[in-house]
Amino acid sequence: MSALSELVLGVRFAVAGGRSAWARTLMTALGTGAAVVLLLIAASVPSVLAGRDGRHQGREVTVSESAPRSPGSFLYADASTLFGGTPVRGTLLRPDGPRAPVPPGLDALPGPGEMAVSPALGRLLAAPEGRLLRERLPYRTVARIGGAGLVGPAELAYYAYGSGLGERTADGRADSFGHNMGADRPSSAVLLPLTTVALVVLLLPVLVFTAAAARFGGERRDRRLAAVRLVGADPAMVRRMTAGESLAGALPGLVAGAALFALVREAAGWFTVWDVNAFPADLAPHPALAAAVLVAVPLCAVAASQTALRGVAVEPLGVVRGTGPVRRRLWWRLVPIAAGLVVLVVPGRTGPVSAWDAAAVAAGALLTLAGVAALLPWLIEAVARRLGGGPVSWQLAVRRLRVDGGRAARAVSGVVVAAAGAIALLMLFGAVQSDFMRPTQLHTARAQLGLFSLRTDHPEEPRRLLEELSATEGVTGASAALTGSVRRPGPLEPGESFAPTTALTVADCASLRELARLPSCADGDVFLARVHGVEGPDDDYLAETARPGGWVDVGHGASSWGIPATARTVEGRRDPLGRMTFGVLATPGALDPAALPEPGLSAAVFLDRSVPDAAERARNAVARVSPLIRVDTVQDLARDRQFTSLRRGVLVAAALTMAVVALSLLVATVEQLRDRRRLLSSLVAFGTPRRTLVCSVLWQTALPVALGMALAVAAGTGLGALVLRLIDRSVTGAELLVAWPVAAVGAALVAAVTLLSLPALWRQMRPDGLRTE
C-alpha cells in the first residue's frame, strides 16, 4: 500500500467511523476553523491600516504655501465636533470658482446651506438619538460621502458649504486634495514593544489551541489503530494513517475557517475594535501571510497528532502505555525559555527602539511563552509523582495525572499561555502609563468646556456667546473674552530687534474676575495683570510695554490707544482653562472690541452635570454663534489617544482570546469524559460513589490549574520585567500586583469550564457505558 493510500485510509477512518468519528472530526474542524479565522484576521491588519491611512491622506487638503485665489481654489476650515464622546469630523468648504476640486467620495461640492454626510452620520441624524446633533448641523443633506472619502464605514463625517468663511476666518486656501505624509514616522519607543508583545500574546494561544484540537478523540483513535495493527499494519503505516485522519479534520477546518472569515469580512463594517473600523475590502490578508496560515495550520495539526503517538505503543492486541508514563525530559523544555532570556537580555539597547528591537522582543516573547507551554506537562507529572495519599477522590485524580499528565496540561496550556502574556502586558501598561498622561492644569471644578477660536471677524461674538449660553438648559455660567496683543509704540530703541509686546484681553467684569484678582470692576475700567515666576513677563517688562497713562499700539500698529491713568495693577491668576493671565485687561467701555484687528476668542463654560446632555446643548449653543469655534472638554489629565486605544484594544482582545481558549477547553473536557465513559461506568458499577468521581474530576482540573497559574505568574512577571528593561523601566510593587487578578481570572475560567462539564460527567457514569462491541 502506498503512502498516499495510507493517508486516504486515515481520511476514511475519520469520516466513515460512525457518529463518534464524525463528532471527533467535527470538533477538530471547528477548532481548526476558529484558529484560521483569528490568524487570517491578524494577517489582514497591515492591509486594514494601509487602506485607512491611504484614504485619510487622500482626503486631506494639500499642505503647502497658501494657494492663490483662482477659479480652481477654495477656502477651507475645520468644523469637527464631539457628540456623545464620539468625534464627528466636519469640514467647511467655500469654492472660489467653478473649477474648485471635489474631495474624494463626492461628485460635487455642497452648495449654500447644504452638506454631504457619511452613511453612518446620515443614519445617526435620522435616528431619534441624533436630535441634538441635528440642531448643531443646520444644513440640508444633499449627498452621501463614498468610501473613498472615509477611513471607515462607521466614521461620522460631513462636508458643508462655509458661507461664513473669509480670508481670516478660514484655515487656509488650497487648490487640491491629497496630502502625502511622506515616510512612515518611527513608532514610539514604548508603543512598538507593547504592540509586538500584544501580537505574540494574542496569537500564540491560538496556535496552542490548534495543536490541542488535533488531539481530540485520542484514546478512541488509538484503539482503532490497534485494530489496524491486528490486520497487518506496521508502526510507520499507523503514523501515516494518523496524519490522514488529522488532515480529515484540519482541511475542512481550513475551508470552514476561510468561509467564516469571508462572512466576518462582509460584516467588518459593523464592528469597531481598538477604535478601528474597516471596509470589507480592507480586510484582505497579505498573500504571503495567508499562504503561511493555510500551510501552517494543517502542518500544526499533523505534527500534534504525530507527537501524541510518541508516548504510545499501538500494538495489535491493544494500546500499551505501561504501568507508568515515560519520564519527561526537562532539559529541552528549558531551552526555549533560556533562548528567550538571551534574546531579551543580551543585546541591550543604546538608542531608540527600532524594528530590530521589536523583532527581538517578538522572538524573546514567543520563545518564552512556548517554553512555558512545553514546561507545563513536565511540571504537572513531576508534582503528581511526589504527592502522597489522601481521600479516594484525591488518589484517583493524582493517579490519572501520573498516567497522563500531558492531556491535563494540554487542556489548560492555552489559558496558561494567555494568562502569562496578559500579565506581561499589564505590567508594561502599568509601568509606562505615566508617559502617556500629563496634568493639564485645568480646573474641572471651575469649568467643564473650553472654547477657542484663533481669529474672528465678529467682535460681538463674546457677548453673543454669553447670551446663547445663559439661555441654554444645563449651563450654569460662562466667561468669554477677546484676546490680542499690544506693543510699545514708536521706533525701536538701540539694540532692540522688536518692540516689547504683551497680551491684551477685552471682556466684561464677570469674565475678567475669572482671569485676575480684581478689587472692584465697572465697565470702562482697565487693569494691568502681572504674575510672578516663569509663566509671564516680569514687572519691569510689563511696565516698559504698558503703564498707566501711557500709549500702546493695538494690533501691530493698526491703531494707538491710551491706557487710562486710573488703570490699576492686579495679580493675574490661572483661568479655568489652565492658562496664567497677564498683560492688559480692558472692559468694552474702555476699549472698543472692534478696534482689535485680528482678535482671538477664549471662553469657559460651567455645566450642571445633573442635567442630561448639558454638554451637547452647550455645544449646540456655541454652534449657533459660529461653527468655527472649537469646543474642548476640560480634563484634569490628558491621555494619549493612541496609547489608550492600544490598551483598551489589547485587553479586549486578550479577554476574547482567553474566552475562546476556555470554550475549547470545555469541548476538550467533554470529549475526554466520553473517552473514559467505560472506566467511569465500571467504577460506579463496583460501588464507587458518584460524588467521589465528581470530586476526582474537580481535583484533576484544580491541580493543573494551580500549577499552571503559578507558572503563568512566574513567566509573565519575568517576561514583563525583561521587556521593561528594554525600554529603560524598572519593576515596582504596583506592577507585580497585576499578576494576581489575571491568575484569578484564568483559574475562574477553568473552574467554570469544569462545572459546565459536570452534566456530561454524570451522563458518562450510567450503566450503559459498559456496553462494548
Image: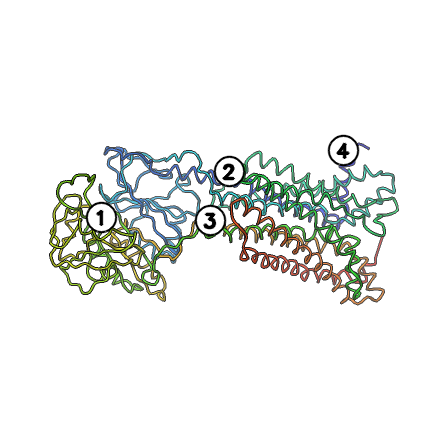
Q: Which residue is mark 3?
A: 643
The amino acid at mark 1 is Thr
Q: Residues within 10 Å of mark 4 (few under 14, many from 20)?
A: few
Q: Earlier in the sequence, mark 2 or mark 4?
A: 4
User: In the shown orientation, is residue 186 left or right of residue 67?
Assistant: right
User: In the shown orientation, is residue 375 left or right of residue 181?
Assistant: right
Q: Nearer the viewer, mark 2 or mark 3?
A: 2
Please, what secondary structure does the residue beneath circle 2 have?
loop
Q: Which residue is mark 1?
A: 456
User: In the shown orientation, is residue 457 left or right of residue 266?
Assistant: left
Q: Earlier in the sequence, mark 1 or mark 2?
A: 2
Distance of label 4 from label 1 (alpha carbons): 80 Å
Q: Nearer the viewer, residue 598 or 277?
A: 598
**Res 507 label:** none
Report x, y in % for residue 278: 47, 44
The amino acid at mark 4 is Leu
Q: Nearer the viewer, mark 4 or mark 1?
A: 1
